[in-house]
Image: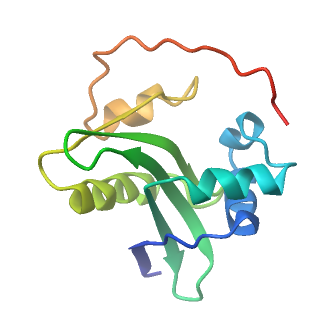
Amino acid sequence: MPVTFAREPDLTAADYIACVGSTTLGEMRPLGNPARVQAMLDHSHLIVTARDEDGTLLGLCRCITDWAWVSYCIDLAVIEGQQGKGIGKSLLDTAAEIFGPGVSIVLLAAQGAEGFYRNIGMSDRMVGFFRERTDRT
């Protein structure tokens, strides 16, 4: 099955919710609030998607960046049934290609996903800190 990886700045909240909702990442995102999801998408600097030949969304990578030094990958999601096929790595590779060699990609791995990132060659040399939001809707 051929998969197309492409920049998709107009990804809809409905597509995001369907994709992320079929992953463990979904429980950490406000999927019950489409307006908030749309705002998240509207303020992203780069969205890369993976779609099959029928246009079905298989996965996505959502980033914010300064386009010169660093990008933060906010979401990397691949729908159940398509995980383990190289789609997540290819999404990150596509984002890295768009950013160019001068921009690094950093992210906070969801608990339990650390092994995936190590397996695709990412290093875990940072300590992350988190200030919790008060509105989770």
Q: Which residue does the image show at 77% across and 37% down from the upper left?
A: 27
48 above or below 23?
Answer: below
Residue 12 x, y percent position in the rendering: 67, 70
Q: Which residue does the image show at 71% across and 22% down from the upper left?
A: 133
124 above or below 39?
Answer: above
Determine the residue located farthest toward the bottom in the rendered image: 54
Q: Which residue does the image show at 47% across and 27% down from the upper left?
A: 108
Inspect this view and state whether residue 22 appears.
no
64 above or below 122?
Answer: below
Residue 132 x, y percent position in the rendering: 68, 16
Q: How many marks?
A: 0
Classify residue 119 by image quadrant. top left
In terms of depth relative to the viewer, which is nearer, 85 or 17? 17
Q: Which residue does the image show at 72% across and 63% down from the upper left?
A: 13
Classify residue 48 by image quadrant. bottom left
Inspect this view and state whether residue 97 appears.
yes
Residue 45 x, y percent position in the rendering: 43, 55
> In which quadrant of the rendered image does the C terminus lie?
top right
Render colour scheme: rainbow
Residue 96 x, y percent position in the rendering: 26, 53
Classify residue 90 by image quadrant. bottom left
In the rendered structure, the answer to whether residue 42 lies left or right of residue 8 reads: right
